[in-house]
Structure formats: C-alpha cells, structure tokens
Amino acid sequence: MSGKRGWIPLFVGCLLASVPVRARPPERPELETPGPQSDAGGASFSPRRGLRVQGDRGSFELHLAAWLRFDLGSLNSEATPRFAVPLARPLFRAHVLQERVSFLLQPELAGGDVRLLDLHVDLRVHEAFRLRLGQFRTPYSRAYITPIVALLLPTRGLVDDTFRLDRDTGLMAYGTAGGFFEYQLGVFNGARINGGFDAARAPMVVGRAVFNVGDSLPYDQVPSAIEAAGTGLALGVAGAYRKASGTDTEPATETAHVALEATLMAGPVTATAEAFHRSVRPSGETWFEEWGTFAQAGVMLLPGAWDASARVGWMRTGRGGDETLVLEVGSAVYTWRPRLGHHLKLNLGYQFLRVRGATDVDDHSLRAQLQLAM
C-alpha cells in the first residue's frame, strides 16, 4: 500500500508541471476597484471603470466603493437587527511619465470619522522591481492584500483580521518575474495605521514570495464573476519580525510571524487556505505561541450571476490559549445584464462562532450586504 500511495504525489507533481505558465503578471495588489482600464484619450466613465481622464502626460482615476449592511446577530438570545454603512471609500490614482510613477490616495469616510487608509507613491523601474513609499497594506496574508471589494464572502474573516499586520508606513520593493513569481519586501514604521514615528521606536520587516503554476492568479477571489477564469495554483510564504523597545502606551514586545498560503482557481471554482503562526515575548516574560488557519471555497453556480461559498477558521490566541472556531456559509447574487461582477452584488451570509477560554461563547449571526463599486 505504501508503494502505491507514493505514486499519488508524483502523479500530482507531474500534472502540475505539465500545465503551461503564461507570462501574464498578476493584477496589482494595490488595485482596490478591479476592472479593465481604458487607454483612450480624454475622459471616460463606466460602472466597471469609474472615472478616468487620459492625457498626453498622464492619467487620473477616481473610484468609489460602499457597503450597505444589515446584521442580525446574537441569535442565541434577543436578536439585534442593525443597519450600517461600514465602508465608504473614494480612491484617487494618478499616473505620470508613461505610468512609471503612480500616486494613490484612499480615505475612509464611514464610521463617523474621516480616516486616511492609503497614501503612497510608486516608482516602476521594471516589472521585476518597483518601489512603494507611504502608508499601505503590509504584504502579509493574501486575503488582506486582496482588494476588499473582490472578496468571496462579505469580509476577510475573523482569523485573517486577527493575524494580518494591518496598514503601516514604510518603503517596499516588489515585482513579478515571468508571470510565475512575485515578491514583496518592506521595512515599516511598526506603529500600524496612522501611527506616528514616535510610537514605535522599532521598525518591522515584512516579506512575501509567491509561486504561480498555470495561469497567474489575479487578486480577486471570484474572477469568474465577470468573465471565464483560467486555471492556476499560487503557493506563497510570508514572514515578519519586530522588536519594539516600548513606549508610554506600548510595552516592549518581540514578535515573529510566519504565514503559508495556497490558492487554486479552476473555471467557476476558487479555493484559498492560509495558516498563521505568531510568537510573542513581552518584556521580562517568556515566549508564547499563537496559531490560526482558515480555508474557504466558492463555486459559480450560475455563470456571472450566482455563487455559493463556505469558510472554516480556527485559532488559538493569548498566553492562556483561548480557542476560537468560526464556520461561515454564504451566497452572492450579481447583476446579469450588464455583467458587473463585484461592482454591484448582494452577499448573504451565516456565521457560527464558538470561543473556549476565559469566557465561553457560542453565537450565530446573519448578514446581508449590498456592495457598490465603480
């Protein structure tokens, strides 16, 4: 039996190696509102492209994304129905010098406060070498750097929200090679989003590498929502390290992070899995470990119009080792004519949450979310 089992990974490896690699680079991770861009001169507007002004010396783009959400939570006790607008984001992007230099600005208008999310400048030396300076999403977790409007389920999920490294201010080198390899490597302030330079006293180093087999996968969890998707597999690894000396508001802490990711797309089917490990050592204490993982899959049941999805997540966090289990199922309805994909869709989802630790929690919730993006 063991000899027969040994042929299985060999067969799978040969099958993947036989898939042709297309030299098409993946979609840029920073693109918050995906969609084809027009190269024609003058001004143009469409629900899929937003507003674009093209001139001889450069171009300017304006996009907008918004969520209208209805939550029915805590079904174990008294239901608490609630409407909210948790996301309202305009995005401004400009390109000059034949798109060798790009500028991006994105605030968040929802939530009662206007907050700066992204502000950065990019320099393209070559497809294999670009530089980014400013505040942006750190390249740790594929789900996190996937545009928030291009998700399979209404959110990235509790596990990813817990282990991702958030936005930060820094300098990053990134690029692609031949459509089969991509990387990001950056040094950041370490103070997270909108943190001041005096708040960290220690930089954070973050790196990520991805290998694509078959078609280069876009940063879109439902690429078949607009058109037929290819077939490919992306395998990635990421890591980060920071040793903070501490401030009045932040204790001295040493942290090390490692993440593994795998994403498969084959026509109407998409699947993604990520695993996270975080080692934490507060000043004067011993190390403790935190773990988390999630896997999700979706299938387009009616081409471009209706999909079904599911996600399971587990994590163990804190020195006490509190364990959390999250189960989610969902479905999304897209416009059929015209086919707008993520630009106009309705997500419906159910979530079961179980926490075991200092406090035990079992919770059920329902969510409906309308997304508008242009």
Image (cartoon, grey):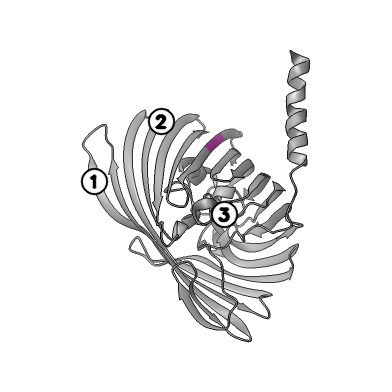
Residue 292 included in the magenta stretch of the image: yes
Contact, CB < 8 Å: mark 3 with mark 1?
no
Q: What residue is drawn where x is 54% and y is 42%?
A: 269
Query: In the figure, is residue 268 to the left or right of 23?
Result: left
User: First in sequence: mark 3 or mark 1?
Assistant: 1
Which contiguous range is marked in magenta?
291-295
Assign a secondary structure to mark 2: strand
How many angstroms separate mark 3 from mark 2 (CA)? 27 Å
The circle drawn on residue 145 is: 3
Assign a secondary structure to mark 3: helix
Q: Position of residue 302 (x, y in %)?
A: 44, 46
The circle drawn on residue 355 is: 2
Q: To which quarter of the image does residue 260 belong?
A: top right
Residue found at the far top of this picture: 1
Residue found at the far left of this picture: 78
Foreground disc of the pair 2, 1: 1
- Return the residue at label 1: 81
How many angstroms separate mark 2 from mark 1 (CA)? 22 Å
User: First in sequence: mark 2 or mark 1?
Assistant: 1
Q: Quadrant of the C terminus?
A: bottom left
The circle drawn on residue 128 is: none
Observer-nearest residue: 18 or 33? 18
Magenta residues, dominant SS class: strand
Callout 2, which amino acid?
Val
User: First in sequence: mark 3 or mark 2?
Assistant: 3
Q: Position of residue 41 (x, y in %)?
A: 57, 83
Q: Residues within 10 Å of mark 2 (few under 14, many from 20)?
A: some
Callout 3, which amino acid?
Ile
Callout 1, which amino acid?
Pro
